[in-house]
Amino acid sequence: MLPSSPGALLVIALLSGAAQAAEPPPVPRCAATARFDLATGAPEGAPDVCASADETTTFVFDSRVAVGAVEFQRGERLAHWALGQDGLSLYATPRADYLPGERVKATVRFADGAAPASTSFWLVGHAAKGTRRVEVFRQPRPPEVLKKERDEAQAEARQCQEDKARLLAAREGPGGLMGAAWLEVAGSLASLPLDGELKQHPANALGWDRAWSYSYTRTGEARPASVAVRLRLSNPGAEPWTLAGAVLVDSAGEEVALAAWQEAPIAAGGAGAVVVGTAREAAQLGCPCTLKLWEPSGPRTVTLGDVTFPAVDKARRDDGAATP
């Protein structure tokens, strides 16, 4: 049972070093939007496209797909698929029990008979980060369009490097990013109980009985603010559960990678606390958000909807008064 002062408990846990930052898991590259240019030559082998359970991936083509010319290997692992009426789009939704690493091959044949006559993709299961849109081009595109896409890819790469730097910073020092920051007196901390507010996905492998969210702002210095969620999870399974990674998905579908802390694996039939957070202001996240947690290379995930963060009263300092 959690103490009546969850904010204080979090600070104490991080100070004592009980909650350690988890190693970032070896997650494959999963962009929200992927592009494949067949005009420059067919890819060597069918490329991988990240897919998540119960989330639709949309393929958009610049050439019509022939009617009846869509094939799936192991198509029974899809809950639904459909070819758009115009023949220029294909929608594929994996089943709710689609596993990380699971693979379904999709092959389409184009209606005009020109080369390449067909193309294939592997829908590769990912615990949390499916690709939402896949753009496939058979026709040559103007140089300015290609330049725009290169600029966007470079900007995304820079953002990934910044996110990686934040995650690495979160693992340094006693207690990590939040532990070091929230122990400073020159800051404001707010907490919000989420009990009764969260929506639990029916396929969740673990249950939860208590949840709190936190917002912290450092006063007077150009340091990033941070937010966090602390969950008490129960494991009904026969094997321990270890937190490997987490993302927060906002209402627009944008994903933010989170640093993760866990005191110890949650034993079979037992319960335990996890903490996830990021160096972002709550206002930047566009919540209510969806929180997704997963284990290393395993099928057991936790998805919770309607996560929100409290506003920080900057007139109050983190001297204990801000903690309920």
Image: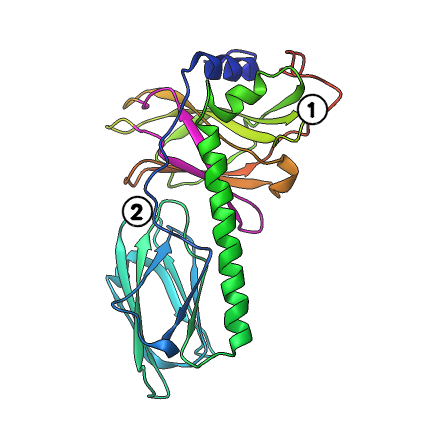
Q: Is residue 18 visible?
A: yes
Q: Would you name the residue on which mark 2 appears?
A: 100
Residue 152, percent from left and from top = 53, 60
- What residue lies at 49% left-to-right and 41% top-to-bottom? 163
Whole-angstrom CA distance, mark 2 to mark 1, is 42 Å
Q: Which residues are magenta?
A: 241-266
Residue 147, percent from left and from top = 52, 69
Task: Tell me the crowding category of disc 2: few under 14, some 14 to 19, or many 20 or more residues within 10 angstroms, Cα based.
Answer: many
Pick the residue in front: 56 or 187. 187
Q: Secondary structure at mark 1?
A: loop
Residue 239, percent from left and from top = 24, 28
Picture disc at residue 189: none
Locate the C terminus and report the quarter of the image it occupies: top right
Q: Nearer the viewer, mark 2 or mark 1?
A: 1
Q: Secondary structure at mark 2?
A: loop
Q: Is residue 198 left or right of residue 219?
A: left
Locate the N terminus and report the quarter of the image it occupies: top left
Pick the residue in front: 45 or 105. 45
- What residue lies at 52% left-to-right and 16% top-to-bottom? 11
Q: Would you name the residue on which mark 1 appears?
A: 219
Q: Do the numbered discs 2 and 1 sit on residues whose CB atoms are within 8 Å? A: no
Residue flagged by tag 2: what amino acid is it?
Answer: Pro
Q: Quadrant of residue 7?
A: top right
Residue 74, percent from left and from top = 23, 61
Pick the residue in front: 50 or 271. 50
All told, the count of numbered labels is 2
Residue 235, placed above or below residue 248: above
